[in-house]
Amino acid sequence: MSVTTHQLIQWKQQGRSIVALTAYDYAIAQLIDQAGVDIILVGDSLAMTVLGYDTTLPITLDEMLHHAKAVRRGVKQALIVVDLPFLTYQESPQQAMHSAGRALKETGAQAVKLEGGYPAMAATVSQLTSAGIPVMGHVGLTPQSVHQLGYKKQGKTAEAADRILAESIALQEAGAFAIVLEHIPADLAAQITQKLTIPTIGIGAGPHCDGQVLVTSDLLGLSEKQPPFAKAYANLRETITQAVTDYSLEVREGKFPE
């Protein structure tokens, strides 16, 4: 049986930690699904990790859907969540409905993720969930607001912490099934996690969230620059570079093929 949004909420109640990773292609999606990941996020981080942009802003909805289709074909168990990219849901609830509907209809994913919990976005989430579209929220550091916020830790002042807490509660009330908490203080993440009945998924938000998510290229040591809160469990940049170097040498020396 595939993981469902209802299961995630049950797991929070049971104290079972939730494991999430990103995927942008069939091969990696298949591998991390077989390894038992609960949520696979087709993140707009692919703009940077796969397409080479400096931020997540340039990626289009069509590009996101292209990659999400490939991920869907590799997954049998995990819940697949697709990021809606910048300016494909902020203009109006109608625009968000169209973009989210395309994501579910065209890719076979089970949910979408939107950034922000301010009143207009909470209202948009409410309309989407009322229409039967599962939504994952995202507060704290929201990369689509990079030109406004940068990549600095959010929620460090009492005022900012109160705002992030209020946004989290608003997203829950709007029907979100889970919320990503990115790059906020651990004590704030703990407070939000205790307040909410839906799961919190942390990234750079300390150990007290209901689950954790990482960008898979960071976990595998493929990223050129590692975020301060990520942990590399392998060094595939070195492994791949060495393998290609060895292959190149053998071809040039006539050792391959033998």
Image (tube, rainbow, N blue to C red):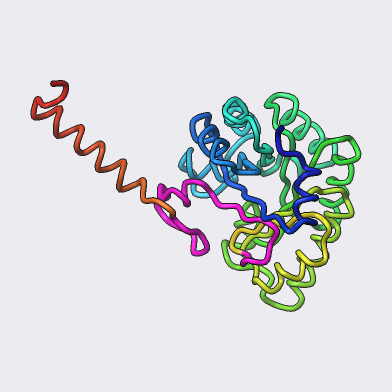
Work out which quarter of the rendered image holds the C terminus and state it. Answer: top left
Residue 8 place in picture, x, y as percent: 75, 48
Q: In which quarter of the image is residue 204?
A: bottom right
Residue drawn at point x = 67 percent, y = 66 percent? 208
Give the vertical position of 90 relative to 161 (above or below): above
Q: Is residue 212 magenta-colored? A: yes
Residue drawn at point x = 88 percent, y = 46 percent? 126
Give the vertical position of 10 relative to 247 (above or below): below
In the displayed structure image, the side of residue 215 where residue 11 appears, left or right: right
The front one of 55 and 217 is 217
Work out which quarter of the rendered image holds the N terminus and state it. Answer: top right
Q: Which residue lies furthest to the top in this view?
A: 258
Q: Is residue 199 magenta-colored? A: no
Q: Which residue lies furthest to the front in this view?
A: 14
Q: Which residue lies furthest to the left in this view?
A: 253
Residue 253 place in picture, x, y as percent: 8, 29
Residue drawn at point x = 47 percent, y = 46 percent? 217
Report the span colored magenta: 205-232
Residue 111 place in picture, x, y as percent: 74, 38
Q: Quadrant of residue 12?
A: bottom right
Label total for image: 0
